[in-house]
Image (tube, rainbow, N blue to C red):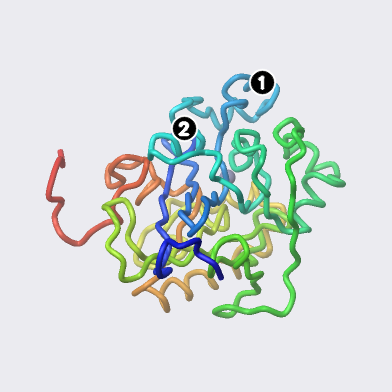
Amino acid sequence: MTHSGHGTFDGMRIHQLNCGTMTGGIPSRVLLVEAPDHLVLVDTGIGLADIADPAGRLGPLRHVLRPALDPAETAVRRVEALGLDPRDVRHIVLTHFDLDHVGGLADFPEATVHVTSEGLTWAVRTPRFMERRRYRRPQVAHRPLYAEYEFASDRWEGFRVVPLDHVAPGMMMVDLPGHTVGHAGVFVPGGAGRNFDDDDTGRDILHAGDAFYHRGQIDPTIRVPASIGVQERALALQPDAIALTHSGLAALAARRAGSLDVVCAHDPSGPGGTSSDSPASTGGRMSDPKPPARGSH
Ligand SMILES: [Zn+2]
């Protein structure tokens, strides 16, 4: 692979960004990956066009989700706030097409949007009754350039995957069914051994999209509020697949605890979240065993 003269490739910096706070302080976690030659987003949260026209773009569900509609939270503004150029976002990988994940697509009209074929078919190409009600056509009306993939024989840690090395070295789409048809996680290798600033841990990250909602669903040491599972099943298009996806992710997180963070879109804890252990929802150090050195309250 080429790295355009930036020297030896030694990993990628990954920012975890909250790109759309919703009711109850639920974040919309997006990954911004600094690949060797460009930027990559995993999901896009709520976008500027959603904020300009919430009724048209988000539809009636906005009354339930009650997004903050703060332009400063959008991915495009977050990228700028980091001193980066939104035009360098050449690729976006989507976990699925729900409105809190695709709203920012229109803010990056030149980016190639990488999706599963199943997700694209059910959400955009030939949505059926449930999908027509669920997905918001205005959010993809600008006709993004899609690159689509099907899971086949490639495996990683027991999961079906699609390698996305052409998007960023080592990146993969990971088959995580349940929430929607064609729902996928996205694996991003971190910058192991590289000393990044304090908003990046250098660890690998699997963004599991909406494959779970609460950290405790894949970590038996953390208690999960009972309402979470009920909500999850109610919103899932393939609810019977949820349990297997959870147990696969739990096993993976335990097995790779030393090097991998498994995160989801809407858990408020950790970087890119909204809770107090998420300093600056623009990033923030992973919950650190040491006491915070500065600015705690
Ligand atoms: Zn979601």
Does residue 214 show up? yes
Q: Nearer the viewer, mark 2 or mark 1?
A: 2
Q: Is residue 159 left or right of residue 198?
A: right
Q: Quadrant of the N terminus?
A: bottom right
Q: Is residue 162 left or right of residue 125?
A: left
N-terminal of the two: label 2 or label 1?
1
For residue 275, the mark is: none
For residue 55, the mark is: 1
Residue in the picture at 30% in, 48% down: 284
Please provide percent x and percent y for residue 90: 60, 48
Quadrant of residue 80 in the image? Answer: top left
Residue in the picture at 36% in, 40% down: 281
Please provide percent x and percent y for residue 74: 50, 33
Does residue 219 show up? no
Please provide percent x and percent y for residue 47: 57, 32
SS of the residue under disc 1: helix
- Residue nearest the viewer, comparing 79 with 209: 79
Is the CB–ligand 1 distance for label 2 below 8 Å?
Answer: no
Q: Is residue 81 left or right of residue 91?
A: left
Q: Amino acid at mark 2?
A: Arg
- The residue indicated by pointer 2 is 77
> Is residue 76 placed above or below 285 in the rendered structure?
above
| Total marks placed | 2
Q: Quadrant of the C terminus?
A: top left
- Labels 2 & 1 near each other (Cβ < 8 A): no
